[in-house]
Image: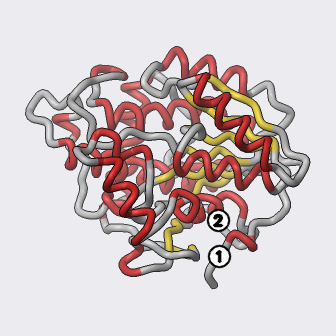
């Protein structure tokens, strides 16, 4: 069965955190959840942009949801810890949608000296999620990792996570998106074994108009064409919304648009994972390396 915006259940009484919610797909995820009555924390680095996003969401909201800014810089572990500490004071957390990311930027490093895309897209979310697992488990919350069709054909180069042996921005982006999917799968396996009420799922937006293209030459033009031919940001938000809200969704599920080779489409459903994304040994190795690099241990035994 395919999932549409009309299938999103009412979310009143529920709380969601959406990373990267000030623009693009993240904004549309936050807006849709608020429109259904959820309390939504927009976890973003830029407070001014978040304030503008909140104003736009609140101005068009039909249900009784609330919105609030949560400062989060995924490239800075101190900021991640501070954001998680503040978020943990919420009465409940039902959904953590890890949507934020960087795509094909000029080379730089962040957490533990790792290349920026791996540091932000994976390590930052690994740390943030790990610090909130206890809170998410209280109400059987869902963790949603935003991956990409770029994970196909990618691998994890553990010997070059810092990019010191060469930097290919496209390759490193694919690596970070594979890491997102591996983490979601491994997290759900470990949550199940632990008896936690929480679950982990993943999604991808296909090819959708997004602020991620800002580092690509001609990115704004490319994004406008994508929004016309394939998916708008709103349509690209649907798979993550399905993962977060569909009553039929289960831990370990992976959702994407139901269009040509999952590149676009106005409905969402189960998507295809690469063989590497389903490799449990690779996922366990990535988990251990992530604990080592962040110094943050989720405290879940191997599945």
Q: Is residue 170 left or right of residue 16?
A: left
- Checking the image for residue 209, the label placed there is none
Q: Position of residue 235 (x, y in %)?
A: 55, 65
Question: Residue at position x 58%, y 37% from top?
Answer: 22
Q: Quadrant of residue 103?
A: top left
Q: Position of residue 52 (x, y in %)?
A: 65, 32
Q: Is residue 254 left or right of residue 228?
A: right
Q: Quadrant of residue 229?
A: bottom left
Query: Which badge, 2 or 1, is on the more N-terminal residue?
Result: 1
Q: Is residue 86 left or right of residue 220?
A: right
Q: Position of residue 175 (x, y in %)?
A: 28, 48
Residue position marked by numbered label 2 in the rendering: 242
Quarter in which the N terminus is drawn: bottom right
Q: Are marks 2 and 1 in contact (CB under 8 Å)?
A: yes
Question: Residue at position x 58%, y 76% from top?
Answer: 267
Please, is residue 260 above or below residue 224 in the view? below
Residue position marked by numbered label 1 in the rendering: 3
Q: Position of residue 149 (x, y in %)?
A: 36, 63
């Amino acid at each position: 069965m395919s999932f549409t915006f009309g299938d999103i259940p009412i979310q009143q009484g529920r709380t969601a955190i959406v990373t990267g919610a000030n623009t693009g797909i993240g904004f549309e995820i936050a807006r849709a959840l608020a429109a259904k009555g959820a309390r939504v924390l927009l976890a973003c680095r830029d407070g001014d942009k978040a304030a503008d996003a909140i104003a736009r969401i609140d101005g068009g909201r039909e249900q009784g949801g609330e919105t609030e800014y949560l400062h989060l810089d995924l490239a800075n572990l101190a900021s991640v810890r501070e954001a998680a500490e503040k978020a943990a004071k919420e009465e409940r957390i039902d959904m953590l949608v890890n949507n934020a990311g960087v795509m094909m930027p000029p080379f730089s490093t962040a957490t533990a000296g790792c290349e920026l895309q791996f540091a932000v897209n994976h390590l930052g979310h690994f740390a943030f999620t790990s610090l909130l697992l206890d809170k998410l488990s209280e109400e059987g919350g869902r963790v949603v990792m935003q991956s990409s069709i770029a994970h196909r054909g990618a691998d994890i180069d553990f010997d070059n996570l810092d990019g010191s042996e060469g930097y290919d921005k496209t390759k490193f982006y694919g690596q970070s998106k594979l890491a997102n999917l591996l983490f979601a799968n491994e997290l759900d396996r470990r949550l199940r074994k632990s008896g936690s009420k929480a679950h982990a799922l993943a999604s991808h937006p296909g090819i959708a108009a997004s602020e991620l293209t800002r580092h690509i030459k001609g990115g704004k033009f490319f994004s406008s064409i994508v929004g016309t031919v394939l998916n708008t940001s709103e349509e690209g938000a649907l798979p993550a919304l399905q993962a977060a809200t569909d009553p039929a969704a289960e831990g370990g599920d992976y959702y994407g648009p139901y269009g040509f080779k999952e590149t676009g489409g106005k409905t969402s459903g189960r998507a295809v994972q690469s063989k590497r994304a389903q490799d449990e040994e690779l996922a366990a190795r990535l988990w251990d390396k992530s604990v080592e690099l962040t110094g943050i241990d989720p405290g879940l035994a191997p599945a």
